[in-house]
Image (spheres, helix red, strand yellow):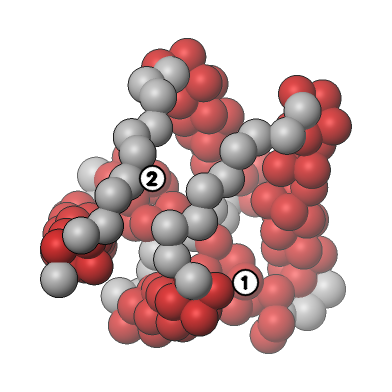
Amino acid sequence: MNTWTSTPFEPWTGLAGGLLIGIAVVLLLLSIGRIAGVSGIVAGAMTKRHFDQHWRFAFLAGLLLAPILYTLFSGPFPVQMQLSSLWMGVAGLMVGFGTRLGSGCTSGHGVAGIARLSPRSVVATLVFFGAAVLTTNAIRYF
């Protein structure tokens, strides 16, 4: 039987992170009229050209630099891997496949789509999280 530890409840850091994500989504939509869906941004960074490609690379650079800056200013944060690197790779491929199948990811549908009251995004997000709950329980208990 697998054992796992719970993560401490820290509402202020969660609130701060949620506010920052929400502000980023709103700023991207208001400034250039784009949805902050990471899978679409990554796909477009590989296929689009000029300005449409530049803002995508800047957005992705911000995602990669954020944990580095956090570590520099706040110190390291503990990360506990509960699965092997192989399983993490398989999971990453499955998430990538799912974002293509679902025409978006949790950031596009779950944050930007639900905020715009998109019925398609509500359904997609319910499916994403339902699959996540089932998968997590299947891995932990089987």
Spot the residue most to the front. 1
Q: Of 92 and 88, which appears nearest the observer? A: 88
* Mark 2 element type: helix
* Mark 1 element type: helix
Going by the numbered disc 2, the residue's amino acid type is: Val
| Residue 23 visible to the viewer | no
Q: Which residue is mark 2?
A: 111
Question: Which of marks 2 and 1 precedes in the sequence?
Answer: 1
Going by the numbered disc 1, the residue's amino acid type is: Val
Quadrant for the C terminus in the image:
bottom left
Q: Which residue is mark 1?
A: 42
Task: Identify the image quadrant of residue 76.
Answer: top right
Q: Position of residue 34 (x, y in %)?
A: 56, 55
Q: Residue at x 37, y 21 (%)?
A: 9
Task: Identify the image quadrant of residue 55.
Answer: bottom right
Left/right placement of residue 65 relative to residue 32 reads right
How busy is the neighbourhood of tag 2: few (under 14 within 10 Å), some, or many (20 plus)? Answer: many
Q: Position of residue 32 (x, y in %)?
A: 65, 50
